[in-house]
Image (spheres, grey):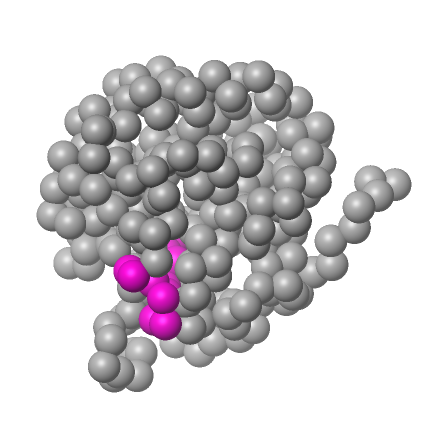
Amino acid sequence: MEYRAWAPRYDRIRSEFGFPFEREVAAADLLVSLLPSDAPRRPLDRLRPLLEGRTVVVVGLAPRTGPPPLWRLPSTDRSPAIIAADGATSLCLDAGFLPTIIVTDLDGPVPAEVAANRRGSVVVIQAHGDNRAALEEWVGQFPGGVVGSWAGPPRPHLLNVGGFTDGDRAAYLADHLGAERILLWGFDFERAAPTDPVTHELKLMKLTWASRVLGDLAREGRAPLLLWRPDGTTAPYPPGRYEESTT
């Protein structure tokens, strides 16, 4: 999705969660200062060859979800690309799958992401107002390919093609970069791993928004967006309809 179409939707999200935009800007500036000197100024150009024309499996970490059964996919000339949403990186590595891309805001098992990056996974690091400490701690420890992203308009070194949480941002990225189809594995918008009550409620609110923005993508995106069920079947993701008004 182009930023101009996504921006009003994110404005509604920021309003609901109370995200101060000046903190987003400060985090973005920090991320740019921490990116390696060889980080691409046009990050989408770095990522496009990895996803264009391929089946893309976006792997989430819903409770009680195992690794995606990639062996069930039809054999083609090009193997599927795997995008791990943050904590799903460990799930993929444990199953012997190396993610093509990792989308992360650095609040999951970052050492596993560093290990995958060393082996060839490209990491898309999201800057936001609440992860500046994590950016300072971890960005310099990634030894491989890294690109940046943030919640504001695209700028040198930082992309934004839509999406809110790691999982739906991964799906938006795949769609924007020309995936043939997108399979969502390990997505559950009603249950989250238990934490303290306040954090758990916030997580559920974020999952509700993730389901909404994926509905927008199903309706407006270029590639078919499919839910990949544990029994191996797929179903179209239910399309939603974006509404400007909050009333």
| Residue depicted at 69% across the width and 60% down the height | 240
Which quadrant is home to the N terminus?
Answer: bottom right
Left or right: residue 70 versus residue 236 is: left
Magenta-colored span: 49-60
Decide whether residue 87 is among the magenta residues.
no
Q: Quadrant of residue 108?
A: top left
| Residue depicted at 38% across the width and 18% down the height | 30
| Residue depicted at 41% across the width and 67% down the height | 179
In this orientation, does residue 42 appear?
yes
Left or right: residue 207 versus residue 174 is: right
Task: Give the camera-side residue of 210 and 222.
Answer: 222
| Residue depicted at 55% across the width and 33% down the height | 152
Task: Give the camera-side residue of 60 and 170.
Answer: 170
Left or right: residue 175 versus residue 205 is: left
On the image, the x and y values in percent for residue 41 come to 34, 38
Q: Is residue 228 above or below residue 9?
A: below
Farthest right residue in view: 247
On the image, the x and y values in percent for residue 151 come to 53, 34
